[in-house]
Image (spheres, rainbow, N blue to C red):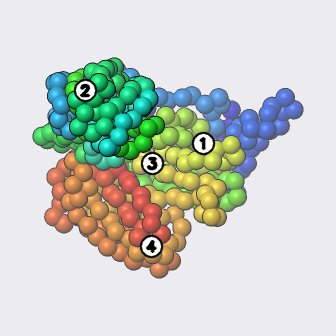
Amino acid sequence: MWFLRCGTPPNTPLAGLLKHGYSNPNTSRKSVLMKSVYPLLITVCACISVILPRNTLAQCTCTGKDSITQYVTVDTSNGPKVLITFNKYQDPTGAMYLACMELTDTISIVSSTLVRNQASGPIIGANFTISVTTKITGPPSINASKSGSLDYGPFDFGPAGTTGTPSDSIVLGPDTMLNRKVTNVSVSNPAPYIGTGTVSDTLTFGGGAFSDAGTSFDYQIRTKYWGSARITFFLCPSIPLATTITNFTASQDGNTVLLQWLAQNEQNNDTYEIQISTDGKQFTSIGKAQSSIATAGTATKYQYQYNLDQANVGKIYFRIRRTDVDRKMTYSGTLTLTPGGSGGDGLFVYNTYPNPVTNTLLFRFNSPQTGSYLLELVNAAGQVIQRRSATLNAGNNIRMDLSPQPARGLYFLRTVDMTHSKQYTSKIYIN
């Protein structure tokens, strides 16, 4: 554990930034990289310490007991498709939100096929492959299929129109093509399934046939199917956002990420815990900052320096958890970063604040951008409530005035970079 002592008088800036590190010949390079993270501090006497080892904070995953499941029976039918209708998820209390969902269907299919020779002459020793397919589709991007097939033959056929032996036709089956076949589809963007009313997904059925004896056959595939479908909503507690944490930003210098935030109206013994995640769900503690009597009632700026793990080539997420003297916990917004991106993009950061928002919000890039942008405020049901177009010329900020002001609740701000075909989504709360 490393501590940064504060002996600076109130309202006196620090003369410099203090770095801490260590070496251990028995420690791996990756371990040194992760443990050499150190804190930085600016303004009144506020301290950050790195806590080792990290303590994992299981936040919200698409598994576990906080879930709701609906079941729908698929009655026996031979139609080409069937609609599966589910009730949408709605929590008027706002205590829980729908993080993701899983759609599962279990289908059995029995099929028979009438095969008829259309040629004017006989066909000897024909073999056949009969297949059936079922596909489930739905919003926003559900598209999964499964299939089954059986082989038949060899069979002899008389010329077209023959009714003797051999005749020009034969019935293959009925046989079970799929027996309780299960398809799972995970959905990470469940917005169309949130709100009031219902939402429908579609099961479609089809078939095909092939013969090694040529293409002179006519096929009539008759299929009956039945089964069930279920949808599971995975729920997470709504995270209370800290209105006292503002201007949470990040910047990169080589392999170092500098996190900065402003703590408004601090109270004695407020704790700020820096957390990191590689999936946006499971967060890990990497350091803490503690307020003091000297900073109570003031606006204090904090800095924290983090060394990037070279083994991580995907997105990383940062956030701040504030705990007050009464042990009440609130959170900053989450910064999403892409270190070492392709094409020399490097670290890319964006943020939306204030959060919660009342009348006006600001979408902010961490570095100057140039291009045309479309901002869309989307409600929990996936409906676009408000839009705003903007152009940046080496600028960082896009302002969006909410007029008329939407109802209180959870929303998503979708920012589309139309110049570079990119899209960014932020979760926001409206008071």
In the rendered structure, which amino acid carries the disc numbered 3?
Answer: Thr
Q: Mark 2 points at which residue?
A: 164
Q: Can residue 410 be seen in this view?
A: no
Q: Quadrant of residue 405?
A: bottom left
Residue denoted by label 1: 48
Q: What element carries label 3?
A: loop
Give the residue drawn at x 22%, y 64%: 386
Position above or below: 348 against 67: below
Q: What element carries label 4?
A: loop
Q: Nearer the viewer, mark 2 or mark 3?
A: 2
Q: How far apart are marks 4 and 1 (CA)?
A: 41 Å
Residue 373 appears left or right of 70: right
| Residue drawn at (28%, 70%) of the image | 388
Q: What residue type is labelled 2?
A: Gly
Q: Which of marks 2 and 4 is in front?
A: 2
Residue labelled with disc 4: 419
Distance (Cα) linking label 2 and label 4: 70 Å
Q: Is mark 2 on a helix, strand or loop?
A: loop
Residue 241 point in image, percent of width and height = 35, 44
Which residue does the image show at 61% across and 54% down from the upper left? 339
Residue at position x 45%, y 66% from top?
421
Residue located beneath label 3 in the image? 334
Q: Nearer the viewer, residue 112 or 122?
A: 122
| Residue 182, percent from left and from top | 36, 25
Amino acid type at circle 1 is Ile
Marked residue nearer the N-terminal end (4 or 1): 1
Of label 1 and label 3, which has the lower sequence position? Answer: 1
